[in-house]
Image: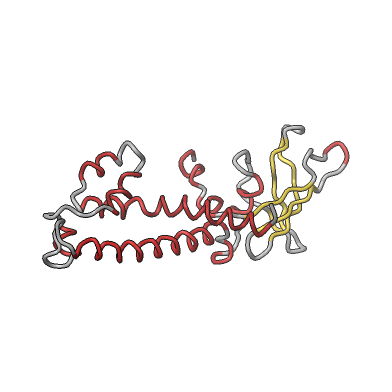
Amino acid sequence: MNGTLWFLAEVMVYGLIWSYLLGLVPAFVISALKDNWVLVMAGFITFGITWFVGATRQAEPDSWWAGRCYPQGSGSGSTEMPEFRKGRRRRGLAIAASAIVLVGVLAARPSLVIGTDADSLQRSVGGFVSFERACLPRSDETWTCFAYDYGLSAEAAYRTDVDRAGCWTARSVHTGRLAPAEKELSGCVTAFDHVRPFNRILG
């Protein structure tokens, strides 16, 4: 897979993941305002999936949502309601698709907006198995980052070049007996490296 296709795949994956996470609370609120209570309760055991279903379903006639967001006189049996909901569905799908792409780009390459810091770069290079907290700046405007090497049973140092998009190439600074099994690594800083959810949970 070439670089462009890989980036597009990342955008879609990160867009879906982060849009899901960011949309949980709004989906819960809208589903509740539509009085779709069965789906609201089911969401607590389906990780919120049914909240999105409830948010897109037609509201109950006596709900807060129906009273304020539907045209007057457009009850469930009204001939106006299907056309009204069809128009909203088209707009909703267009907005959702645009949001997924935008969120995907920002999540896959957040460095384009907020830059790359020493902590996020180290998390990207070192991954989950890393004991170092941050990369170290070098005099040539590159970084010294660390990645665990199972052959050495220790972390190996890598000279790391990073571009504006947060994509990096790391080359081992050691040779001979101290050289790690992987002489060169590459990757890109993502939103997970900036947020570091597992580190915040595990300390």
Q: Residue 149 in the image: state x and y as whole percent.
A: 73, 37
Residue 26: % across, % down: 31, 55
Above or below 180: residue 105: below
Q: Position of residue 162 (x, y in %)?
A: 69, 60
Residues 130 and 24: in front is 24
Task: Give residue 125's position: percent from left, percent from top.
Answer: 66, 48
Q: How is the image coloured?
A: secondary structure
**At 69% from the left edge and 52% from the top edge, which residue is drawn?**
1
Residue pictured at 77% horizontal, 41% vertical? 182
Q: Is residue 6 left or right of residue 69?
A: right
Q: Quadrant of residue 110?
A: bottom right
The structure residue drawn at horizontal position 25% and vertical position 65%, both measured from the top left corner, is 83
60 with respect to 152 (left or right): left
How many dots with numbers?
0
User: Which is nearer the eye, 193 or 81?
Assistant: 81
Among the 4 quarters of the image, the one containing residue 74 = bottom left
Residue sticking out furthest to the right: 176
Quarter occupied by residue 94: bottom left
Q: Is residue 5 above or below residue 80?
A: above
**Going by the picture, which residue comes out furthest to the front?**
79
The front one of 46 and 111 is 46
Left-right relation of 98 to 112: left
